[in-house]
Image (tube, rainbow, N blue to C red):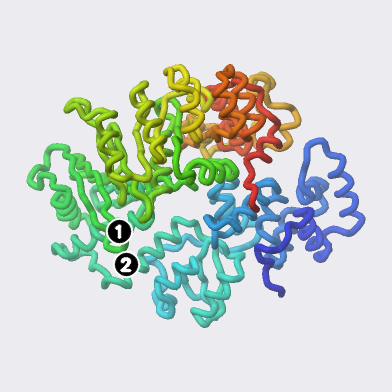
Amino acid sequence: MSTAPAVSTPVLKDTGDAIASLLLGHGLINDRQLKHARRVRGKLAQPKTLLNTMMELEFFSSQQLNSALQGCTQMIRLGDLLVELGDITSMELDIAIRMQGEPAHKGKKVGEILIEQRYIKEPRLIDVLANHLGFLHIEPDFTAIDKVVLTSVTPGQCEQHGFIPVRRQGDAIIVACTDPNNQETLKAAEDLLNHKVILAISSQFALRTALHKFKVSSNSRVIPPTTNDDTAVTRLVDEVLQAAITMKASDIHFEPFSDKLRVRFRYDSMLWLFKDVGNDLAPSLIARLKILSKANIAERRRHQDGKIEYSDPSSGQVIDIRCSFYISVHGEKACLRLLNRRTELLNIEEIGMAPAVLERFKYEALEVPTGVVMITGPTGSGKTTTLYSCVDYLNNDETSIITAEEPVEYVIDGITQCSLNPKIDMTFAETLRHMVRQDPDVIVLGEIRDKESAEAAIQAALTGHKVLTTFHTEDTIGGLLRLMNMNIETFLISSTVVSVLAQRLLRRVCQYCAQPYRPSPLQMQRAGIRGEDLRHANFTQGVGCETCKYTGYHGRISVFELLVLDEKVKEAILSHRASYDIRRISIESSGLITLLEDGLEKASRGMTTIAEVLRTLPRTDKPRSLLEIRRLSRSTDV
Ligand SMILES: [Zn+2]
């Protein structure tokens, strides 16, 4: 059989072509039926994929389809199949394939990107691979793995290729990975194991957990689970903490029961069982946690708090862990919150900006050596998180960054941070005077509150510094107007402000209970959605489930409006034009995508709902069509 098509293969004109020729080859359809299906499809009012059309015409059963697919997994690209099954749109597949070519996603599989972009949920992807393509579905459990199959590989090799051998089956070895359709993974596994390999599909979490346990077990001898001595407990605590850190868990629960102590991790807002520990270990384990967190070890009748500064041996990073001890009927329960500085600090690529907007923000705002970049929005709009991810982006060995915040919220390595304290007369102006003497490249001012702090920011920019700050206004144009209303000279504004970024947080549709829906005519009218936009949209809403506590929402997404001040916008400010004019000029000349437009685009991809867009976003102008917004949001250098 030929090797699977690589990423570079051009996108087929129709994702259904490969499947159609497969079905022809298997005699499930004939040429006449295929032509008929294409004709029918061409006449449909609601667009449908070729595969779905043929299935609706009942040319073959879904069992027949599956058995045809299962023999030929290498001929069908997973992405095409997902489009044909109606799980993703061809546009989403197109975006995922293009993203694969970007440095930020290098080495990622299309499936991974589709999950990251929330185009598809992991359980559904596993379902397609297992049920349609016939791959074995295994959630590897390290303790159950036949250790003989691990002898010829190291944890490092497994991590590099993203798989773990699980057991022997006949003359082959079953290997779990997240993309069993990948020929490179198959070849690497076969070479390393020197055996025939059957790839099985596993969830990312189960694979990561198993890989971590493999790593730990090969570093330290396996801990005898029932020895009640101190070193065993110390090692167990270390193992749990390190596992939680590598898995990027946010919390660790140590829960006592009558017969065991259960250790669970919260990961991606869900609790996952890490392991059960014998009951006899529980008191010494909790005692060890109390020692580490400097809580009172003798106190066993009251709830307590503590804090651990854990230095992770693998990365050398110091991680703050907040501990809470709670007295339960079966003994003390410990709950640890990992304040991992690196995960709480979002990478600029992860804040949720559309590709084209992110590019402009990086190259035309952040990387411009001087001038003011303002991040604006009401309280709770996520602007502080964005401010810190900007700082993180600019933070490197060649740049000196100094901050004045009220107060410092995240501690970042490599920069100088200061909390303003008005009580001891440590004011903005006073601090700024000292800041500029520290020879900084970038000055971060927590928030512009009044004329004094606004003037301070502009002054710093005029003396050749890059200034990052936040502001409390509705949108980008509102930010400029506020400065003008503070009686700051328009020539100072137009010559120092480089960019204004407005943002909001919207509730994300719960992934566990999302269902497609069609917005009501009233909603469409209020949001400015046209009938034709519906063809390009996959609106979803949560119907309510346990995970989202029956709200239909789980997690949040950010929506942005980026204004980069070009000559025309500057001219409009200088000549004191009305806000309506400045807004129109920004949209027409500087490529501004409004908050409403970004929100609608994200809603059309099922990330949030129209109701949420209407509830939170200002509706000043009628949005452009969905296709136009997508064109503007799309990255230009692909
Ligand atoms: Zn739900």
Name the residue located 15 percent from the left edge and 49 percent from the top edge. 290
Residue under label 2, please give it: 216
Query: Would you call the spot at circle 2 few (<14 residues within 10 Å), some (14-19), or many (20 or more)?
Result: some
Relative to residue 392, is residue 513 depicted above or below? above
Name the residue located 29 percent from the left edge and 31 percent from the top edge. 406
Relative to residue 427, is residue 177 depicted above or below? below
Residue 209 or residue 378, whichever sits in front: 378
Residue 134, picture quadrant = bottom right
Residue 113 or residue 138, whichever sits in front: 113
Marks 2/1 in contact by CB < 8 Å: the verdict is: yes
Callout 1 amino acid: Gln
Query: Would you call the spot at circle 1 few (<14 residues within 10 Å), some (14-19), or many (20 or more)?
Result: some
Q: Which mark is residue 64?
A: none
Sequence-earlier tag: 2 or 1: 2
Residue 581 or residue 86, whichever sits in front: 581
Residue 354 in the image: x percent, y percent?
57, 41
Q: Is residue 592 visible?
A: yes
Callout 2 amino acid: Val
Task: From the viewer's perspective, tell me whether residue 134 is left or right of residue 414.
Answer: right
The quarter of the image holding the N terminus is bottom right
Residue 410, picture quadrant = top left
Name the residue located 25 percent from the left edge and 30 percent from the top edge. 430
Task: From the viewer's perspective, tell me whether residue 133 is left or right of residue 229.
Answer: right
- Per the model, the C-alpha gap separating discs 2 and 1 is 9 Å
Residue 86 in the image: x percent, y percent?
69, 46
For label 2, the SS is: helix
Residue 85 in the image: x percent, y percent?
70, 49
Name the residue located 60 percent from the left edge and 43 percent from the top edge. 356
Residue under label 1, please give it: 242
Relative to residue 95, is residue 373 depicted above or below? above
Q: Is residue 169 visible?
A: no
Asked if the beta carbon under badge 1 is closer than 8 A to the nearest atom of ligand 1, the reply is no
